[in-house]
Image (cartoon, rainbow, N blue to C red):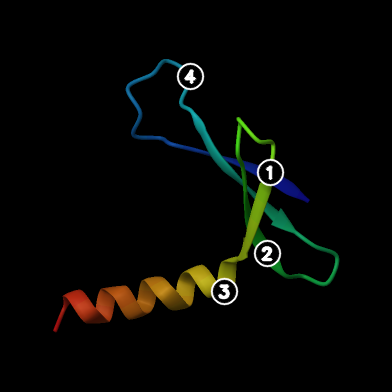
């Protein structure tokens, strides 16, 4: 399953697409960003994003 993720705080009438969220058959969720110039796709596991954001939040709240 694929879900388009948009920048909802954009001032554009049609918000720009930031990335796609993808759920694989095994249940893992990824964020996928496609470089418009090179057409290269980069995927990161959503769980890795959450872990890094948790660490970031803890660091700024110390």
Distance (Cα) linking label 1 and label 4 = 24 Å
Q: Which of marks 3 and 1 is in front?
A: 1
Q: Residue lying at the far front in this picture: please name it.
A: 38
Circle 4 SS class: loop
Distance (Cα) linking label 2 and label 3 = 8 Å
Q: Residue 14 carries which label?
A: 4
31 shown above or below 3: below
Circle 1 SS class: loop
Which tag, 2 or 4, sits closer to the chain's start?
Answer: 4
The image quadrant of residue 40 is top right
Are discs 2 and 1 less than 8 Å apart at CB? no
- Describe residue 11's horizontal placement relative to residue 38 as left or right: left
Identified at 48% across, 19% down, the residue is 14
Distance (Cα) linking label 2 and label 1 = 19 Å
Distance (Cα) linking label 4 and label 3 = 29 Å
Q: Residue lying at the far left in this picture: please name it.
A: 62
Which tag, 2 or 1, sits closer to the chain's start?
Answer: 2
Identified at 80% across, 62% down, the residue is 24
Distance (Cα) linking label 2 and label 4 = 26 Å
Circle 3 SS class: helix
**Disc 3 crowd, CA 10 A, few/some/many (<14, 14-19, 20+):** few
Q: Which mark is residue 47?
A: 3
Which residue was labeled with disc 2? 29
Which tag, 1 or 4, sits closer to the chain's start?
Answer: 4
């Amino acid at each position: 399953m694929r879900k388009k993720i948009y920048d909802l705080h954009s001032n554009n009438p049609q918000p720009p697409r930031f990335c796609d969220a993808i759920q694989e058959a095994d249940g893992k969720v990824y964020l996928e960003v496609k470089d418009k110039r090179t057409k290269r796709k980069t995927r990161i596991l959503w769980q890795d994003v959450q872990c890094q954001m948790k660490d970031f939040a803890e660091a700024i709240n110390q």
